Image (cartoon, grey):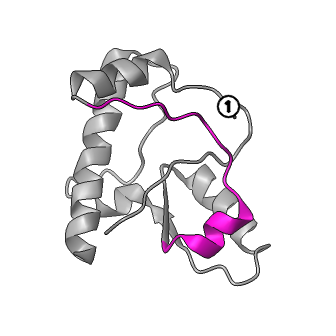
Amino acid sequence: QWRTDSAAVSDWNVGRFPDSRALNCLRDHGIETAHKARQITKEDFQTFDHILCMDESNLRDLNRKSNQVKDCKAKIELLGTYDPQKQLIIEDPYYGNEKDFETVYEQCVRCCKAFLEKYH
């Protein structure tokens, strides 16, 4: 059994719903969500076994934050590490278009499947 969550390194969008293009992409794939953005907490580093991120900037920030947490148990790594197509970085689609959100969705699904296969 897995417990998953989503959190941002920064607090820019805390309390907001995802971008409408992201919501449309998820709906196109039969996924509904009521998720609102939240910022990662010290407890996340102590609770979760894995914290997966999209790019090197997130990775640096998460590693820096984890160093400030006593008893950090989370393994922090790039989600793209698990990509069978070897696309290590998952680019933020915010400044792109709907196609870019679809690309990110596909990358995330590939990576998550490979991640789960590794730990299943």
The quarter of the displayed image where residue 17 is located: top right
**Quarter containing the C terminus:** bottom left
Query: What residue appears at the point 71 percent right and 58 percent down from the top-left corner?
Result: 41
Looking at the image, is 101 positioned above or below residue 113?
above
Decide which of 114, 30 is in the foreground and name it. 30
**Quarter containing the N terminus:** bottom left
The quarter of the displayed image where residue 4 is located: bottom left
Decide which of 112, 14 is in the foreground and name it. 14
Query: What residue appears at the point 65 percent right and 61 percent down from the top-left corner?
Result: 62
Where does residue 43 sit, x and y in percent of width and height?
68, 67
Query: From where the camera sits, is residue 75 visible?
Result: yes
Where does residue 28 sit, x and y in percent of width and height?
23, 21
Q: Amino acid at mark 1?
A: Gly
Looking at the image, is 85 positioned above or below residue 82?
above
First to last magenta residue range: 31-49
Q: Is residue 32 magenta?
A: yes
Q: Is the residue marked by circle 1 packed among few (<14), some (14-19), or many (20+) residues within 10 Å?
A: few
Examine the residues drawn in magenta and state their main secondary structure.
loop
Q: Which residue is mark 1?
A: 15
Q: Residue furthest bottom?
A: 71
Q: Is residue 105 magenta?
A: no
Q: In the picture provided, is 25 more to the left or to the right than 75?
A: left
Where does residue 82 sit, x and y in percent of width and height?
30, 62
